[in-house]
Image (spheres, grey):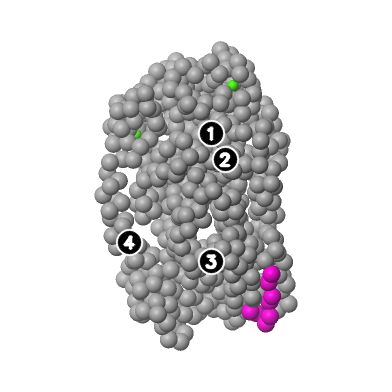
Amino acid sequence: MKQHRRRLPLLSLALVVAACTGAADAAPRIASLVPGTATGTWTVQVTGKEARKPETLAFQVDGRPLAAEVQGAVEGDTVRLRLVDVPAGARRLTVGLRGKEDKPLAAVGFGPAASPFAGWTVYHVMVEMFADGNPGNNGEITGWKHPNYAGGDLQGLLAHAPHLQDLGVDAVWLSPIFAAKTSHGYDVLNYYRIGDAVAVPGDPQASLELFRRLVQDLHGRGIKVVLDLPLNHAGAAYDRKAGDPGGLDPRATAARQEAEKLWESWGSGYRYWDFGHAPTRRFLKDAALYWLRDEGVDGLRLDYVRGVPHDFWAELYKEVKQVRPDAWLVGEAWTDAAGEEANATDIATWFDRVDGGLQFDSLFDFPLQMTLTSVFARGNPATDLEEWLQRCEAMYGPDALPARFLDNHDMARFLSWTQETDRLVAAVGFLASLSGPAVLFYGTETGLSHGGPKAGFTDAGRIPMPWDRLDQPLLGRLREILRLRREHPALAHGGRLPLLADRETLVMAKVVKEETVLVGVNLGAAPRKVDLDLAGLLPAGAAPRSLLGEAPAVLDGGRLTWTLPPRGTWMLSFSHLPKTGERE
Ligand SMILES: [Ca+2]
Ligand SMILES: [Ca+2]
């Protein structure tokens, strides 16, 4: 029986149609943003049809209106403006239309990211496919088993922990490791028991001790542990004794939402927790708190958040932060094969505050995943990438710290869309240069791929990790990128200044007090020479240094000429302090 975990909700079609009509040409984009040479001034270029009438544009910095003076004539769809009296320490510029300032159309976070999670590189493991450290538990899958099932377990993870450390990740996200019937584990039978198939069969205590050893080992390597905890639903045969230590007698219902009904039509056999029943909510929050508070887990990846009411997530967030303020809560809100607009609109509702409180630290950035794939793997214009970075920043709001990724267990792998490893490396390089958690699906570092590409849900990317034939050159290239991300805080924490975007090229600056890193993407087949006026950004005497590959650069009187080799992401570091008083 086909037993996938989720599917395109039928209502998405209307959203796709809506997304394709009108929204795409509705948004202006910040073509470039650089500090002026005078304190508190910035020069911004806006492009898009709205730019033809610059008097209709409204600029805000950190939610406060800001005057903008048009500089020179409008050229085509682009206008240059000067922003004045930008306060020191300002963080975020939004562009909207006059009278609709509360719904900005584009935004750029040009101040550094404050969140401790901004620099995390998270390695996403599908446990069943990763490493089989104990063939003796492979017979414990009693329900649906993925045809690629590789016997993966915690013993295998423990044995391969050095691989994660060597790659240089900060955290590992494990697919569900709890008692379950299926190999994927999203049908949890007991939130408090590690599954026999991933640990020690028939011995819950030994399994828990194995998990504790794994956590201790990973922590010793500087790697945090994020558990995948499905709270919307559980397996139909949930253990109502050992799985309910508080005696809360949680209530479950049959499928009620469209997606849930679809899973049931495939025979998923889940039960759906009743969020209208207070003891059930207590039961679910207790399960989450147990792993974070009592077992040293550092974060939770929360499955299918769209099935659960907003106020539950806000309650859980508040209680988690009271005991573990350092724990990362990341939610999955995915409208599957619907377009970027539909996904971003929905994700924004999970970034909203509920009674003043957050629901999550991060949501997975599905719109950007789609755009990264279409631009880096499929040859769509690089302007799409700049546009979606700004659209999502505007829609998600100032509290948002989206988690960026290229692919996951529910979708076609990046390398199913292109055969070119250079395109994958370029995409990872760009991903690593964005502030906010960056998530790498296991196997990316060895170029894992599968057959034909497919939009929306597919489980074809769940492939055993080929431990006996790792792609060492590719591994080395990704290790180098992650090293740069760790060693240069401008990449993972820096404010972002768009500098240039066209068909095949994107250039941005990432800025912290100590350093500016220019990130240049060239997806063309030929070298690309770019000329940039960085007089207000870089102090006199700043000298460029190539970080990632050799891309020749000459800086002369504030003008940078940078030659980007083909098919890659390149980085230049300027270690001189930027001028004081303009940014921090
Ligand atoms: Ca095994
Ligand atoms: Ca539900």
Q: Which of the 4 quarters of the picture holds residue 444?
A: top right
Q: Viewer-proximal residue, 188 or 87?
A: 188
Check disc 1 and give the amino acid type. Ile
Instruction: Tell me which amino acid carries mark 4.
Output: Ala
Asked if residue 419 is positioned above or below residue 105 in the image, the reply reads above
The residues tagged by marks 3 and 1 sit, at their Cα atoms, a distance apart of 33 Å
**Residue annotated with mark 2:** 448
Check if mark 4's residue and mark 2's residue have beta carbons within 8 Å. no
The answer to which of marks 2 and 1 sits earlier in the sequence is 2
Q: Residues within 10 Å of mark 4 (few under 14, many from 20)?
A: few
- Rounded to the nearest angstrom, the CA distance separating label 2 from label 1 is 8 Å
Q: Residue furthest top?
A: 202
The CA distance from mark 2 to mark 3 is: 27 Å
Chain-order first, disc 2 or disc 3: 2
Q: For mark 3, what is the residue?
A: 505
Q: Amino acid at mark 2?
A: Leu
Q: Secondary structure at mark 4?
A: helix
Of residue 551 and residue 137, the one placed in the foreground of this image is 551
Q: Secondary structure beneath disc 2?
A: loop
* Residue depicted at 66% across the width and 29% down the height: 158
Cβ atoms at labels 1 and 4 below 8 Å apart: no
* Position in image of residue 21 (x %, y %): 28, 60
Q: Which residue is at the far bottom?
A: 72
Q: Which residues are magenta?
A: 552-559
Residue wearing tag 1 = 463
Question: Residue 460: x percent and y percent?
Answer: 46, 36
Q: Is residue 39 above or below residue 210?
A: below
Residue behind mark 4: 23
